[in-house]
Image (cartoon, helix red, strand yellow):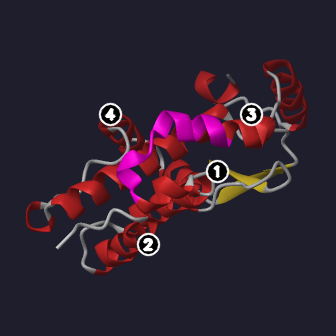
Amino acid sequence: MAKDYSEASFSNFMRQSVVSGLIKPATLRSRKLAAEQLMVELKSHERQDLRLVDLEELCSRFHKLEGSSIRPESMDVYKSRFGDALRDFIAWTDDPKSFAPSESEHKVLREQWENEPDGHQRAREELALNPPRNPHQIFPVPIREDLVVYIQNVPLDMTAREANKIAAVVRALAVLDETADDEDTA
């Protein structure tokens, strides 16, 4: 029996891998979002055999069409997650009995994130599961255990100077707290 490396088989693998417990639901959601974004640019021969996908070239095609509407960091995340999904799919198709999912995301980054306050982890998880699709969506920024501030209309091509301008306005709104640590005022 011939092995099926098609887009349809990939979609089936994604569904079945979460149902069977091979891949965590949150990991699947992030991979699925990346796949949905990038697979739009697949050529017909790549759709028939995903082993033919050159991830660098696919990302290049996607980036050319999207232009400046996608941040380089987002492109890197899509590339990493779709690459993990493809590697797992191909490994599973090659030998389902000995399949073990790859480590997604960077281990060092995950270890750093585990030591951050809960609010930061919740905000990052929210952005990972529901990333902004355009510059007019809202970005959650947890600033205290019980308080999240939302930022909207952030341009995708914002410069450091523009970010500093926004930060200066926010700093001007702050109430002076004489008991604050140096870290809080930095």
Does label 4 or label 1 sit earlier along the sequence? 4
Drawn side of residue 19 relative to residue 113, left or right: left
Hey, which quadrant is residue 40 in on the image? bottom right
Q: Which residue is mark 2?
A: 8
Task: Give the residues drawn in magenta, as a range.
Answer: 49-62
Location of residue 75 in the rendering, given as x and y in whole percent from the top left corner: 60, 39
Q: Nearer the viewer, mark 3 or mark 4?
A: 4
Q: Circle 1 sits in a helix, a strand or a loop, which is it? A: strand
Drawn side of residue 29 relative to residue 165, left or right: left
Q: Are marks 2 and 3 in contact (CB under 8 Å)?
A: no
From where the camera sits, is residue 184 visible?
Answer: yes
Q: Residue at x 45, y 65 (%)?
A: 7
Report the disc number at residue 150.
none
Q: Which residue is mark 3?
A: 177
Location of residue 39 in the rendering, given as x and y in whole percent from the top left corner: 56, 56
Q: CA distance from mark 2 to mark 4?
A: 34 Å
Q: The residue under label 4 is which amino acid type?
A: Val
151 and 24: which is toward the camera: 24
Report the disc number at residue 108.
4
Q: CA distance from mark 3 to mark 1?
A: 19 Å
- Asked whether 58 falls inside the magenta stretch, the response is yes
Q: CA distance from mark 4 to mark 1?
A: 23 Å
- Asked whether 148 falls inside the magenta stretch, the response is no
Q: The residue under label 3 is which amino acid type?
A: Asp
Q: Which residue is mark 1?
A: 142
Q: Nearer the viewer, mark 2 or mark 4?
A: 2
47 and 113: which is toward the camera: 47
Q: Are marks 4 and 1 in contact (CB under 8 Å)?
A: no
7 and 100: which is toward the camera: 7
Does label 3 or label 4 sit earlier along the sequence? 4
Location of residue 157 in the rendering, given as x and y in whole percent from the top left corner: 82, 31
Does label 3 or label 1 sit earlier along the sequence? 1
